[in-house]
Amino acid sequence: MEEFESGARGRVTIYSIQGCPHCVQAKATLGRLGVPVCDVDIGTHSELRAKVKELTGRSTVPQIFFNNVHVGGNDELQKLAPEELQRLVNLVKDEPLPVDAPPLPQNTESEDTAGENDGAFNCEQDELAPLVQDIKHGGVIGSQRRGLTLHRKSFSGSQLVDWLQKEKGMGRAEAFNTGRALLQRKYMVSVHGSGKQDGSFDEEKGAMDTLYRLLEDDPHSALNAGQTASCSPVQASELSLILRELILKLFSEHLSADGKSVDYKGMSASPAFERYCELAIQLQRVELLSLSREEKLAFFINIYNALVIHGYLRLGAPTNMWQRYRFFNYVSYLIGGEVFTLQDIENGVLRGNRKGIAQLRRPFSKTDPRLQVALPDAEPLIHFALNCGAKGCPPIKTYSPQDIDGQLRTAAEAFLENDDACMVDSGKREVRLSQIFKWYKADFGGTDEKLLNWVLEHMGDSPKKTSLQGVLSAGKTKVSFLPYDWTTNSSH
């Protein structure tokens, strides 16, 4: 693909985003035609999204132009008859670039420097981090018995206070304040069932008999566990953006030339993935309770999408119903001192603590501390940001709090443009929708009528929307659901 350039000769312009398999396939096809191709990443140049939508009437990418002739997306490109494709190639070769050719970015500086800051993160060591290392090697950690249960890698509050006084020369008040700080900053957690669980560390409240563990010693299967986050806590939204961009770049680099498969094995061996894992550890101690609704949406959508890829790298892509159920209920990150599985993030946080598919109960009980992080209500738009199985991707891969609602509406509009998401049969007065609308019908109103009105409201102006309006106005619309494609994109 060529750099952006000015001049009178013709060109093919493709608007794409990083990590979009349909864009990769289209660019591979265009690269074989022997004509100049300008690739415009509208993930980077978001100022062009509105103009591309105006020119094409679509929200999906890729969008492809031969000079000023709009071909459509990758699906349309692949279906072009050989003689029509050759006519378009000749148009680019023989005709000068028309004045109404689709626009290129005015400023290419951000394009040139893109990727330079991937994974950029300044780790300022937390003042308590050296103390945690001393606790690990200071003999205070051992096996403690409570009743018939032996709690390994643990210590009591009194043992910690005594150790801080004896080994660190602290007064009793300072030792208590230090223990309280270790608990509040999520360097240590109380052992379930061993005493007080209210997060206090006070002699008068019986905290001295309670057992504690360092967070890294607390037994769970989180993919970012086993090491201590020693950096000063970073803002959650900032960290999620860095992580999402880093793993998206990694994903793009290991996407096959035809866009159909991902080399997860090669991806897991990459030094960049090691860097990603180091950064993911810092999620352990981010502050979640102070996040606004917009920050929660952007943070948890980005982390969910990154965690899915991390799960594929560690466990492999699930290939059947049981593996999928286990994958989404098992793959997890330790975030802000609590473990969040994919299921917890989607149904617990982003859907306002609603039951998920095949779940018998809500993800979070009334006493679960993670309930404080959950959104008050389900946000239906998240379903179009958490997956991209359609033939065209939304022009956004990483979400930011600043315009999260607009970004989510764009993702929904892009999803509904695809025939594998919504098909309207005017003759039969039937609307066929993605299984997502069946699985999460409650999020879209709970009835067929409310569901169809929601779909209509979130469609972009298009012939499909006009057809849907006509079917709905005629009354007695039949709703059916399309098969869902669970095919994995792993190359192994």
Image (cartoon, rainbow, N blue to C red):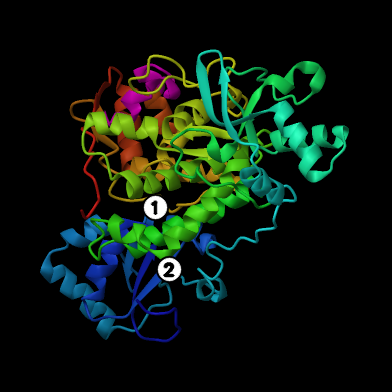
In the rendered image, residue 454, in percent from the top left (x then y), is placed at 43, 28
Asked whether residue 52 appears in the rendered view, the answer is no
Q: Residue at x 45, y 59 (%)?
A: 274
Instruction: Classify residue 454 as left or right of residue 431.
Output: right
**Would you identify the image quadrant in which residue 55 lies?**
bottom left
Mark 1 vs mark 2: which is more N-terminal?
2
Which secondary structure dominates the residues rendered in magenta? helix
Classify 345 as above or below 127: above
The crowd level at tag 2 (other Cα within 10 Å; few <14, some 14-19, many 20+) is many
Where is residue 393? Give x, y as percent. 36, 50
- Relative height, residue 309 to residue 458 (above, below): below
Please identify, in this view, whether the residue under mark 1 or under mark 2 is nearer the observer.
Answer: 2
Left or right, 182 with respect to 168, comes to left
Count of numbered badges drawn on the protein:
2
Report crowding for label 1: few under 14, some 14 to 19, many 20 or more residues within 10 A (C-alpha): some
Which type of secondary structure does the marked residue at label 1 adopt?
A: loop
Pick the front one: 54 or 223: 223
**Which residue is more in the foreground, 466 or 204?**
204
The residue shown at (35%, 38%) is 465
Query: Which residues lie in the magenta part?
Result: 432-450
Numbered mark located on residue 40 in the image = 2
Q: Which residue does the image show at 35% across and 47% down from the upper left?
A: 314
Disc 1 designates what residue? 57
